[in-house]
Image (cartoon, grey):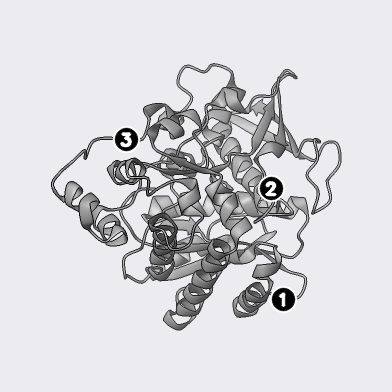
Amino acid sequence: MVVSRRGFIRVVGGGVVGAALVGGGLQGCDRMPASAVAPWAGPGSETDPRRRALSWALLAPNPHNMQPWLVDLRREGEIMLHVDRTRLLPETDPFARQIVIGHGTFLELLALAAGAEGYRCAIEYFPEGQPAPDDVTERPLARIRLQHDGTAADPLFSQIPLRRSSKEPYHQTSLQSEHAQALRGMPRSGVAQLTIATDATRAALFRSITEQAMLIELETPRTLKESIDRLRIGADAIAAQPDGIELHGPFFWWLSRLGLMTPEKAMTPGTTAYQGGIDYALGWARATPAFGWLTTAANDRLSQIEAGRAYVRLNLKATELGVAMHPVSQVLQEYPEMATLQREFLSAAGAMPGQTVQMLFRLGYCEQVPPSPRRPLDALMMS
């Protein structure tokens, strides 16, 4: 996460840190480690078509950037995709629904990347049986075989290295009708149905719900701690663990040196770190002109995967159009404190009984943001 100089000085209230920054101190320190973003350059010298496709797939959006994918290449010509059960989010995602959606985004990028080199992905879901909606097992979610048949490249493939989840305040500009229409017209699985809300009154309602959901997550100690435990503060920490929620740059360098930014301070109400996190989240929640969401008739694991595949295709199309996009699914999380607000959202969204809103996301316009850290491909491999 990159915070502007103006935003940082506002949060800390000026003082010695603000004065030092305004004076031009250490503007080049604590840069994003090159190793953490190297995967965004693509597969490089990889020759195995499976590994080449996987090198693009690992750039997929996923909850808390935990990159919860395990890949088994030990069978010739096959890719077996598993959930890395050490990378779950048990407090905010107790049924691993969002984690499985993140496997759908991975599979879609895998298929696009394979297609760009003339391979068709034959995906067999749950080759050893589909798990229950609240179960995460060691069994694979998918078996993938690459078949070289001269498949034509999907134009969306070229957007993979440019795709971002833009966690910034968006410009106060309405989503252009032609952009909304282009997103609505995107080919996708019929399992996931898309709704986009651009009407000012309706968007204001969803901004309010999103803001309330963020506050519930941030003010519930155990759900906040789940995020704090996944903070990577500073370049050294990011290089060591290129996942989770990264904070880097001269502003955070100063905060760390002054003892104002630690996991303990981020958990403590009244501190700069705690209040800064709230201010940051509410800033982007309030600066959103439009929302979209994906709804499925069922909530089994296959529906969750299909929702992930549909979501990342929308994200790639939005990138092509110059539209910023950012998941804000806090209100969809299945823990008790969120239940009342979740019912209010589902009613406002027009969800019918039995339907599940799998993804909620912001839409708008902002400057391009830098890529988030990614683990190297070998870190995903099962041995």
Mark 3 neighbour density, 10 Å: few (under 14) some (14–19) many (20 or more): some
Q: Which mark is residue 31?
A: 3
Nearer the camera: disc 1 or disc 3: 3
- Mark pair 1, 2: CA separation: 23 Å
Report the front residue among 2 and 105.
2
Under circle 1, the secondary element is: loop
* Residue depicted at x 32% and y 60%: 11
Nearer the camera: disc 1 or disc 2: 2
* Residue depicted at x 82% and y 36%: 127
Report the front residue among 279 and 53.
279
Q: Is residue 84 visible?
A: no
Mark 1 neighbour density, 10 Å: few (under 14) some (14–19) many (20 or more): few
Mark 2 neighbour density, 10 Å: few (under 14) some (14–19) many (20 or more): many
Closer to the chain start, of discs 1 and 3, is 3
Residue 87 percent across, percent down from the top left: 65, 40
Number of labelled discs? 3
Q: Which mark is residue 45?
A: none
Q: Which residue extends farthest bottom?
A: 201
Residue 33 percent across, percent down from the top left: 38, 30
Q: Quadrant of the C terminus?
A: top right
Query: Of the residues shown, which amino acid type is indicated by label 3?
Result: Arg
Report the front residue among 277 and 147.
277
Residue at mark 1: 352
Within the image, what quadrant is residue 8 found in?
Answer: bottom left
Query: Of the residues shown, which amino acid type is indicated by label 2?
Result: Val
**Residue 185 vs residue 132: left or right?**
left
Residue at mark 2: 100
* Residue depicted at x 33% and y 46%: 255
* Residue depicted at x 52% and y 68%: 215
